[in-house]
Image (cartoon, rainbow, N blue to C red):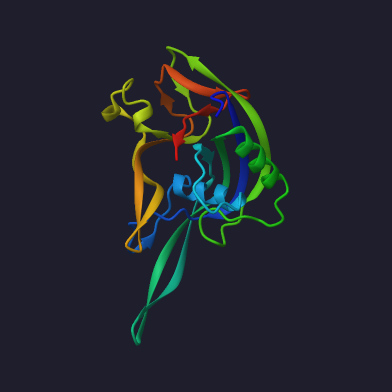
Amino acid sequence: MSANAALRVELYQQTACYKKPMAQKAKETYPLPPYSTVKGFLHYVLDANELIPMEISIQGTHEGKLFDLQTHHFYKSKEVTTMPMHVHMLKEISLIFHVRAEQSVLEQLQTALENINEAPSIGRREDLAVIENVKLVTLNERHTKEILTLKNDIYVPRYSIADRLDYMNYKGISYRLNTVYQVKQGIRTWETVQTQFFRKGEGLNSPQYMEDEDGHIVFFHAL
């Protein structure tokens, strides 16, 4: 795996709900798709039957939220109950994924994305995505004493900056995101990562970070 090479994938979605798993009375959405969702999307594109080692960085923007009222049906033995539920959806979404893996995996993924014959989903099945650009990029390590002004919303794994920042003073929002799972006694057991979500325009005090050749800041999490 080359530390300086990554595949950048740019996508557009008109609407999407990246459902928070613990939400009960409403289908609340994360502000960006979590690692588990992006991992699933990439493995689907690769037609993979087993976990492929890779590192992922997730960033993007959206223009606002929509709230849809839907009727959900719950089946318990012979009884069927219904309940109205609000679904939170983001709208006009632009996403940027950086993927770092073995060169052969990046090349296979690039070919698969450039020749995909259907609109993939990210989020719910109906949350279709348009692949706008796929590019192999070079990453560079940067050092600065300046505050970084973020160009996009972004997930930053807390472990990647905890040694350099007092994370109790973060402006961002803390999320524990699902990453990969193991099946134990027929039940999925998820691994998680503590992540800080920063919004576009916020300042990030990180004296060391990765940046691609077009100026996109990158923070990877390994799956």
Is residue 130 positioned above or below 24 on the image? above
Is residue 114 positioned above or below 158 on the image? below
Snapshot quadrant of residue 195: top left
Residue 133 locus on image (x, y percent): 68, 39
Q: In this view of the protein, which residue sits in the foreground, 80 or 44?
A: 44
Q: Is residue 179 left or right of residue 13?
A: left
Is residue 190 positioned above or below 143 on the image? below
Q: In this view of the protein, which residue sits in the foreground, 169 or 196?
A: 196
The residue positioned farthest toward the bottom in the image shown: 78
Image quadrant where one finds the N terminus: top right
Q: In this view of the protein, which residue sits in the foreground, 109 or 64?
A: 109
Residue 45 locus on image (x, y percent): 61, 51
Image quadrant where one finds the C terminus: top left
Q: Exactly how many numbered labels are in the figure?
A: 0
Q: Is residue 68 left or right of residue 24?
A: right
The residue positioned farthest toward the left in the image shown: 168
Q: Is residue 193 left or right of residue 68?
A: left
Q: In this view of the protein, which residue sits in the foreground, 52 or 166?
A: 52
Residue at (35%, 40%) from the top-left corner?
193
Residue at (39%, 72%) from the top-left corner?
84
Residue 171 in sight in this render: no
Residue 82 locus on image (x, y percent): 38, 78
Residue at (56%, 38%) from the top-left corner?
97
Snapshot quadrant of residue 85: bottom left
Residue at (39%, 21%) from the top-left corner?
205
Residue 19 in sight in this render: yes
Residue 125 locus on image (x, y percent): 55, 62
